[in-house]
Amino acid sequence: MKDRSKNFYVSLLCLGAPALAYFLDSRTMGICGYLKGLPSCAFKAISGIPCPFCGMTTCFSAMSHFRVREAAGIQPAGMLIYLLCLAAGFFFIGRGLLGRPFIDLRKGKYWRPAFNLLLSLIGIVWVYRFILEILE
């Protein structure tokens, strides 16, 4: 029973962000592209440049409303994170329903390279946005 509850708990965590993003409409962007009603990025407010995660909420919202092209323009790395959240969420729901033991994915041999690849993608997008900010 303990493994089943862990599987369901992790699936709720993974599916929570995409589900929450569905209720945010990325078409109601306010100043600087932020969703109306949400605070703007503190990093950008202080430094004047977007942080590595700027646009993730708007990207998740666009993906939740099946506006993939819009999401790709906002935050390409966010699309990958969104899809990973969905995949992991359904993976753990399936394991919970089947009564399979909980798998801590962080202990697998592919976790570190996949995590580093994801962080690299976020960094590349950030540098690209930083260069665009300077050129404007």
Image: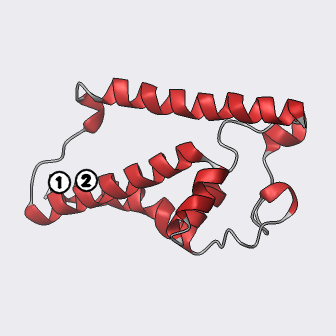
Residue closer to the observer: 130 or 13: 130
Residue at image position (31%, 55%) is: 87
Q: Amino acid at mark 2?
A: Lys
Q: Which residue matches tag 1?
A: 2
Question: Gap between marks 2 and 1, in whole Å?
Answer: 6 Å
Badge 2: few (under 14), some or many (20 or more) residues near its Cα, within 10 Å?
some
Residue at image position (71%, 72%) is: 27
Asked if residue 91 lies left or right of residue 73, the reply is left
Q: Is residue 47 among what the camera can see?
A: no
Residue at image position (26%, 37%) is: 105
Which of the labelled discs sits on residue 127, or is there none?
A: none
Classify 73 as above or below 29. above
Front position among marks 2 and 1? 2
Asked if residue 27 lies left or right of residue 117, the reply is right
Residue at image position (44%, 28%) is: 117
Residue closer to the observer: 20 or 52: 52
Q: Is residue 90 among what the camera can see?
A: yes
CB atoms of marks 2 and 1 within 8 Å: yes
Horizontal and vertical percent position of residue 20: 54, 68
Q: Amino acid at mark 1?
A: Lys
Q: Which residue matches tag 2?
A: 6
